[in-house]
Image: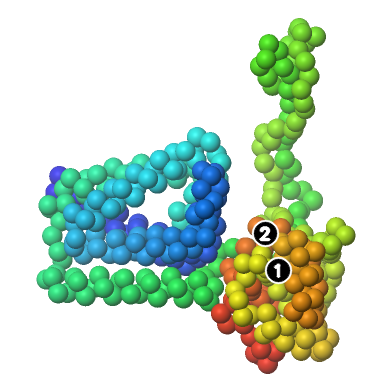
Amino acid sequence: MKWITQISRILVGVLFIISGLIKANDTLGFSYKLIEYFEIFQMQFLDSYAVAMSMAICIFEIVSGVALLLGIYNKLNSWLLLLLITFFTLLTGYSAITHKVTDCGCFGDAIKLTPFTSFIKDVVLLVLILFIFFGNKYIQPLFNKAIVTIALSVAFLVSCFFTFYTYMFLPVKDFLPYKIGNNIEALTIVPPDAEKDVVEMVFIYEKGGQNFEFNANNLPEDLDAYNFVDRKDKLIKEGFKPPIHDFKIFDGAGIEYTDSLFANDTYKLVLVQTKIADSRKGTTQSIATLAEAWKKNGYAFWALTSTNLEDASKYATENKLPYTYCNMDAIPLKSMVRSNPGLILMKKNTIVKKWSSYNLPSYEVVKKYMK
């Protein structure tokens, strides 16, 4: 029991530190995953607390992992870990059964896990934590109390700093397809010889108050006894999907302008303001000043939002903004830059630099990155 406890302690401690650091690198992205779960369980009243909750979970995972490795606060730590892993095992188990969430976000965008894989991972962790819970008497501090207390305090302060830093100034490591150096247009292209989706036509019929699904090859012999309800296409096997497949820009009339952005071969600035009402206060005028100077020098400035364009136009008029908003779905906007608002500098269609709402640049700063 002693050796199993020690091995479990090391494995769980290391895994929690890695998991916490990966999520802390992108707390805003992790908060989006929490909001997905809130919507599934009809708990949208927690949406406004998602960022704070994601930060707290990241910090707890890191500190808890360090505490395990140091061998300190064993009883309290094992209780907290057991409660946490039990909750997440139930959650990932639900996802594995229903497939309502395709990725638990356990390791952010760095490592994508299927719902079933996430569930198995949590079951294994649950077993290891049970060994820690029942064998915590075998875990002794690595050093004297003063040293382990200082070490744990440092871990707490560092994890807090890292979590808040990446939230304010964007992830240190970007795992998304919109990272610096990537060509957006190139990542939207589907090769001519790419594997296509395999789709099966499914017919839905009703009989005796119950719906039945049939494909074209297994229609019942007594089809006349059934009432036709609907027809749908069922995905059997997913074909090739480009890393960026939802980058679509539209104006107020529903006309697509994606190719217009791609056709511009010079430098361009892209403002990402997912929801205007939720964007960070006090940034409007600094962006307007930059946009005005940018456009005066002959460069293109694109403003993208998922907000209704009628409301966006009203906002632009009220604030006398020197640019017009275009529409894009919220999902790609959230992936482009983890900030609301955020700015992206592109040369042709390659991302050169990103800025969050906490370090918006002046025209002079942007010019430095154009060299």
> Which residue in the structure is indicated by mark 2?
330
Residue 35, how many percent across, how many down? Answer: 53, 53
Under mark 1, the amino acid is: Asn
Q: Residue at the far bottom: name it.
A: 364
Sooner in the amino-acid sequence: mark 1 or mark 2: 1
Q: Quadrant of residue 304?
A: bottom right
Can you tell which mark lies on residue 183? Answer: 1
Q: In what quadrant of the picture does the N terminus appear?
A: top left
Mark 2 crowdedness (10 Å alpha carbons): few <14, some 14-19, many ≥20 = some
From the viewer's perspective, tell me whether residue 346 is left or right of residue 265. Answer: left
Q: Nearer the viewer, residue 10 or 282?
A: 282
Is residue 113 placed above or below 171 in the rendered structure?
A: above
Q: Residue at x 65, y 57 (%)?
A: 331
Element assignment for label 1: loop
Is residue 197 placed above or below 232 in the rendered structure?
A: below
Under mark 2, the amino acid is: Ala
From the viewer's perspective, tell me whether residue 371 is left or right of residue 89. Answer: right
Mark 1 crowdedness (10 Å alpha carbons): few <14, some 14-19, many ≥20 = some
Element assignment for label 2: helix
Q: Tell how many labels.
A: 2
Q: Quadrant of residue 337?
A: bottom right
Residue 335, how many percent across, how many down? Answer: 62, 63
